[in-house]
Amino acid sequence: MLKHKQLTTIKRRKFIYQSLLGLGLGALVLKTWDLQVLRFDRLYSLSSNNRIKIRLVPAPRGSIYDRTGLLLVTNSPIYNVTIDLEDVEDLTALLKKITPILKDDLADLRLKVKKGAKRSPFPILLETDIGFKEASFFQVFQEDFPGIAVESAFKRNYLFKDKMSHLLGFINWADQKTLAQAPTNKLASYRKIGRSGVESTFNDVLVGRDGVIQNEVTSKGLPIRVLDEDLPIPGGDVYLTINSKLQSFIYDKMPGKGSVVVMNANTSEIISMVSKPGFDPHIYVDGISKNKWQALSKDPDHSLIDRCLQGVYSPGSTFKMLIALAGLETGLVNSDTHFNCPGFFRKNRQVFHCWKRSGHGPMDMKNAIAQSCNVYFYHLARKLGISNIVKFARLFGFGYKTNINLPHEVSGLLPSPKWKLTTLKQRWLPGETINLGIGQGYLGTTPLQLINYINIIINNGAVKRPMIIKKIVFHNDKDKLKTDESTPQESSLESKASSISIADHNLELIKEGMYLCVNSKKGTGRAAKSELLDIYGKTGTTQVISSKTKRRIIKETGELAKKFHNHAWFVGYVPNSELLPTKQAYSIVVMLENADKSAYAAKFAKQVMEFYAQQNN
C-alpha cells in the first residue's frame, strides 16, 4: 500500500496537471470568444474583402513601316475607363455617379455595359481616350467608384490616313467567335483585330503576347500590392515594300478617282498602290455607328472599295499585246504580217469600227500596237478564235487572283463560251470573239492583274507573285530582337516564280511596239514621253456605256454626264535605268475613272515615274 506521503505527492501532481489543462482550455475558449464574438466583424471583413485578382495586360500592337523605315502606323498612349461588374453592388447608382465625369448619356453607358458583357469576360470598356484630368480624378478617388478602373492603353494611329487606307486597313473590336479562337497567351491583345489590308493579313504577327499582373485587392477591386508581374511582349513590326513619298505624291496629284500601282518588275515588290478616294481608318478603331456605316456604304464615290484589288474594268486596248503574243506564238502571224485598216471591219452583217474612223491603212504588228489599230486586232482575233484567246489569257493571269498578301482580292472575269452558257444561258457569238480582240465585252480585270501581265512581258515569261512585305521583325521580353539562332531575327516573304514559255524574239517585238506607242509621233501614248526616262507603254479606254446609249443621252439631255465618260488606262514600264533604285525595271498601271481620254492616264504615268526617279537622285 502507498504511504500517506506518496499519495499526497500524486494528488498534488494531478492538481497541477489539471490546472494546466484547465488554463489551456480556458485560454483556447477565451481566444475563440475573442475571434468569433469580439472581433468577428473586423476579421470577417478582412477575410472576405482581401483576395487575389489576376489581370491580363494587352500588348502594344506592332508598328508598320515603309521600305525606308518611315513610320506608317503606330500606337499613341491613352487612358481608358473600364468597369468590372464583379466589384459592383449597385450598377445604376454607379453609372449615374460617373455620367457627368465622362460627359456621357446614362442610356449610352447602360448599352455599353450590356454589349460589353456579351462581348468578352474582360472588364467592360466604358470610355476610351479620356483626358488626363478625368483619369487623375478616378485614380485619386478610387474608393468612391467600386468596380471602375483607369487603364493605360494604346490607340492605333494611322499617320497617312486616306492615302494608305485600303493598303493598311484598320482594326476594330473582335467578336465572340474570334475571341474564342484566339491563342491563350493573346486573349487580351485580341480584343481588337485587323479587319482589312495589312492589319488583317498580318494580324497574328502584329498582335503581341499578353502580360499578366497578379494583385492583392480589396472587395472594391482596389489594388493593395502586386504579387507577381509578367510584362507583355509587343507585336512584331511589319516593314512594307511601299515608298511612302511616292504613295503620297500619287494620291495628292491624281486627277479624280482611280488607282495606280507601281512595281519593281524584276523583284515583284510593290512600290506604291493607291486607290482614290480613300477613307480615314480612325473612324473604325473604336466602332462606327450604324448610320455612319450606312452613309459610307452608299457613298457614290465608293471610297471603301480598293480599286487596285477589287475594281474590275474592261482592259480595253491594253489587252492587245496579249492578242499579239497569242498570234505570234501560234504562228498565225509574224512581224511582217499586214492587215489593211479602212476604219472598220465587217463580219457578215456586223460592222466593227476602228477608233480612227478614216483608217490607218496597211499596218504591221509593231505599228498596230503603237497606234492601237482596232482593225488589225479584229483580224487577228478572228484568226485565233476564242479557244486560243482564253488559253493565252489564262497563262497571263486573267481570270485568276494574283495571290498578293492582302485580303478581298477579286479574280476579275475571263469570259468563254462555257462561262456564257452556264452563267447567262446563252451561246457564244462570233462577234464577241472579235470584240475581245480589243479587250472589250465581258472581259474584266483589276489594275493589279493588269500590271502583273505586263511584268510577265518585261521578265520574258517569268511569273511572280506581287510582294507587299519587305520583312517582319519580332521582339523578345526585353523589347529587343531575338538572338536565338533557332528563331530568325527577321522574316522575309519571298515571291514564288514560275514561267511561261514564250519566244524571246516575240517578246522583243511586243516591247518594240510599246516603245513606239510612247515615243513615236503617231503613238497613242506619246503623252507619256519623257526627256528623263525611256518609257514603254500602252494606252486603253474602257466604255462605261455603249456608243448608242451615249448618243441617246446626248440627244435627250444635250450633254453626257461625267459618270458616263470612258475610263482611261495606261500600262507601261521603264527598263533598267541608272536613275531608278537598284537600277532595275519598274512597271506602272494607271486607271483614271471617267477621264475620257487615255492621254490623261499616260501623262500622269510620266509624272509619277519622273517623280520617283528624281527623288532618288
Image: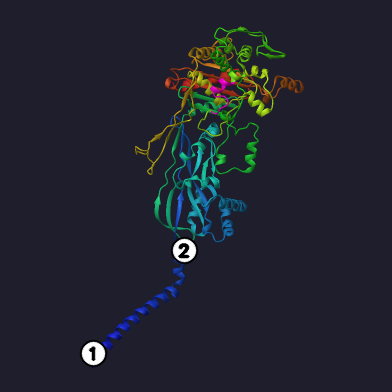
Q: Residue at x 46, y 53 (%)?
A: 55
Q: Position of residue 221 (x, y in %)?
A: 48, 58
Q: Residue furthest right?
A: 556
Q: Is residue 553 visible?
A: yes
For the N terminus, give its image quadrant.
Answer: bottom left
Along the line of sight, the residue nearer the viewer: 204 or 416? 416
Q: State the residue position of label 1.
A: 6
> Which amino acid is tagged 2?
Asn
Q: Which of marks 2 and 1 is in front?
A: 1
On screen, residue 114 above or below 327: below
Residue 608 can be seen, yes or no: no
Contact flag, marks 2 and 1 (Cβ < 8 Å): no
Observer-nearest residue: 449 or 501? 501
Residue 245 at x, y percent in the picture: 49, 27
Instruction: Indicate the amino acid at tag 1.
Output: Gln
Q: Distance between the residues labelled 2 and 1?
A: 59 Å
Find residue 357 and report its horizontal and vertical position in percent: 67, 11
The label on residue 49 is 2
Asked if residue 544 lies left or right of residue 80, the reply is right
Residue 576 appears at what percent x and percent y?
45, 17
**SS for tag 2?**
helix
Numbered disc 1: secondary structure? helix
Looking at the rendering, the stretch of residues picked out in magenta corresponds to: 390-401
Vertical comparison of 349 with 29: above or below: above
Q: Does the magenta stretch include residue 450?
A: no
- Camera-side residue of 354 and 276: 354
